[in-house]
Amino acid sequence: MTLTFVVVVIGWVFFRAGGFDAVLSILRGMAGFNGINLHGSWYGLFHWRLIQLMDSWGIHFGPLPAIGGENNVMIEWIAALWILVWLTPNTQQIMASFKPALEEIKEPAQHLSWRPNQIFALLIGFVFAMALCSMNRVSEFLYFQF
């Protein structure tokens, strides 16, 4: 799973960057060649000699760049969503009782298994209606730039 995640994240760079120079610049930054900035509140967690060593390696403490809001909120969202993605069951596990795959699902979801009922039908109907109402908006195709 980790290898697939890393390959997909790196692959996104090639699809979204404006040119090959931008790809190289982004990949260098992702690998830490431009330095690494840790949140300033983490400064007290490390011994001062370790902080000096980290500083010589290009690892610094300070405010993180704001992306759409407060830095602490961004870190909390990233942590919460990381836990959600990696620790919750996937769709095959959720739908295991309906045999969605050719092979047997080894670890079906216990608490999040799919149980169709009227509430789900109403929710899906609402989402479908919202999708129909949104069809008049212009949405550029992802691969349009190629």
Image (spheres, rainbow, N blue to C red):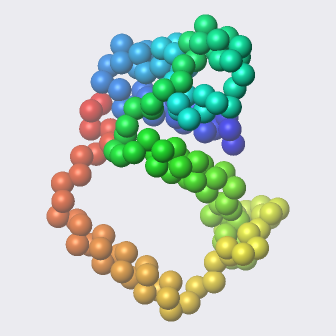
Residue 58: x %, y % from top left: 56, 12
Residue 144: x %, y % from top left: 27, 38
Q: How many marks are shown on the rendered structure?
A: 0
Closer to the camera in the image, 88 or 126: 88
**Quadrant containing the C terminus in the rendered view:** top left
**Quadrant containing the N terminus in the rendered view:** top right
Residue 115: x %, y % from top left: 63, 83
Residue 105: name its quadrant: bottom right
Q: Is residue 28 visible?
A: no
Q: Is residue 133 left or right of residue 120?
A: left
Question: Residue at point 67% right, 60% down?
Answer: 88
Residue ranking furthest to the top: 56
Closer to the camera in the image, 75 or 83: 75
Residue 138: name its quadrant: bottom left
Q: Is residue 145 left or right of residue 51?
A: left
Question: Residue at point 23% right, 52% down?
Answer: 139
Closer to the camera in the image, 133 or 103: 133
**43 w.r.t. 69: above or below:** above
Question: Residue at point 59% right, 12% down?
Answer: 55
Closer to the camera in the image, 38 or 96: 38
Question: Residue at point 52% right, 16% down?
Answer: 35
Q: Is residue 131 left or right of residue 90?
A: left
Residue ranking furthest to the bottom: 118
Residue 24: x %, y % from top left: 43, 15
